[in-house]
Amino acid sequence: MFPSILFTTNDDIEEFNKNKDQFLITRKNLEIDFDIVLGKGASATVYKGYLKGRSPLLNLENTIKCQQYQDCDVAVKVASTLGQIEATRWMQEIEAIKRLGYNEYIVSMLGWCIHKNSYCLAFEMASSDLLTYVRSLSDRDRSEIDLKHLVAYLWQISNAMSFIAACRMVSDFGLCCDFDRDTLTYQASLTKRLPLKWLSIEALMERRFSEKSDIWSFGVLMYEMFSLGKEPYVALQNDEIIPFLSQGNRLEHFDDLPEEM
C-alpha cells in the first residue's frame, strides 16, 4: 500500500520515513537553487541542485559508475501542488522508481526529501538533453549527419524500455505508474494530464496503456530524432489528432531512412 497521509510539517514526514525508506535524504544535504529552472511541467518544476555526501543509491548499487553520485550536481524535481491526491501519486512514483531499480540507460533517482511540505526528488544531472542535441544538427546539411549516431541513441533508449517492460512498469521522467498484474495494462484517470501527440490511438480514446502503446510512443520519438527535433503532428491541434489517426494517417516518412525504420 502507498501512504495517502498528508503531513503538516517537514519533521512529521521525516519522522514517519526515517526508519522506512532507504532513499530518504536529509534535507540539509540537498541544496536546491530555485533560481535555475531546468524544466517545468503541469505537476512539478525541475531545479538545479547539489547533493552533499553519498547518494542513498550507493547503498544498493555500489558500482564504479555509481561512485559519481556523491557530492554532485543533481536535477531536483519539486512538486508544484500537494493535496491529498497529489501526495499519494508522488509516493507511488517514488515507490515505482525504487522497485524499477538501477539501469545505466535510465536516469537514476538519487534520493528524495521534503521541503516546505513538497516532495523533492533528486535525479542524476544530464549534461544536456537529447532534443536540444538533435535540433543542433539541423544547422548541418542532412547528408553530413551520421544516422548511425542517432540509431545508437535509439538503441540505448530501447534497451532501457526493454528493461522497464521486463519489470512490468510504464515510466518516464514525469509519469510513473504500475501495470495491472492481470491485464498488463494501465488506465489513466481523467485528472492525469498526458502528452497527447505521443500517445497511441487506444491511449487517446480509452486512456489505456500497455507495452504496445509504449512502442507507439517510441515510434514518435524516432520521428523526433530523424526529423532533427521537429514537433510531431505540428500542423494539427490536439482535438484533430484522434480523427487524423482514426482515418489511417500517420507521421511522414523520411526518404533517406531504410524501410525498416
Image (tube, grey):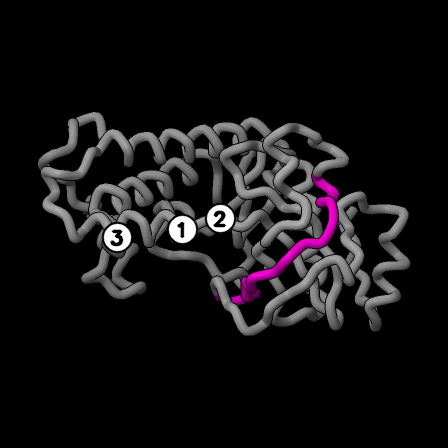
Q: Are marks 1 and 2 in contact (CB under 8 Å)?
A: yes
Residue 202 lies, in percent from the top left, at 39, 45
User: Dot 2, how many residues are within 10 Å of its Cα: few (below 14), some (14-19), or many (20+)?
Assistant: few
Residue 159, picture quadrant = top left
Residue 66 lies, in percent from the top left, at 63, 35
Quadrant where the C terminus is found in the figure = top left
Q: Residue at x 48, y 33 (%)?
A: 160
Which secondary structure, mark 1? Answer: loop
User: Dot 3, how many residues are within 10 Å of its Cα: few (below 14), some (14-19), or many (20+)?
Assistant: some
Amino acid type shown at disc 1: Asp
Report the Cα–Cα distance between label 3 and label 2: 17 Å
Q: Main secondary structure of the magenta part?
A: strand
259 part of magenta stretch? no
> Is 256 on the left-hand or right-hand side of 103?
left
User: Dot 1, how many residues are within 10 Å of its Cα: few (below 14), some (14-19), or many (20+)?
Assistant: few
Residue 1 lies, in percent from the top left, at 78, 46
Q: Residue at x 54, y 73 (%)?
A: 35
Residue 252 lies, in percent from the top left, at 16, 45
Amino acid type shown at disc 3: Arg
Please name the residue that numbered disc 1 is placed on.
129
Where is 150 relative to 87, above or below?
above
| Mark sitting earlier along the chain (3/2) | 2
Please name the residue that numbered disc 2 is placed on.
126
Q: Which residues are magenta?
A: 40-57
Report the Cα–Cα distance between label 1 and label 2: 7 Å
Residue 55, picture quadrant = top right
Please name the residue that numbered disc 3 is placed on.
135
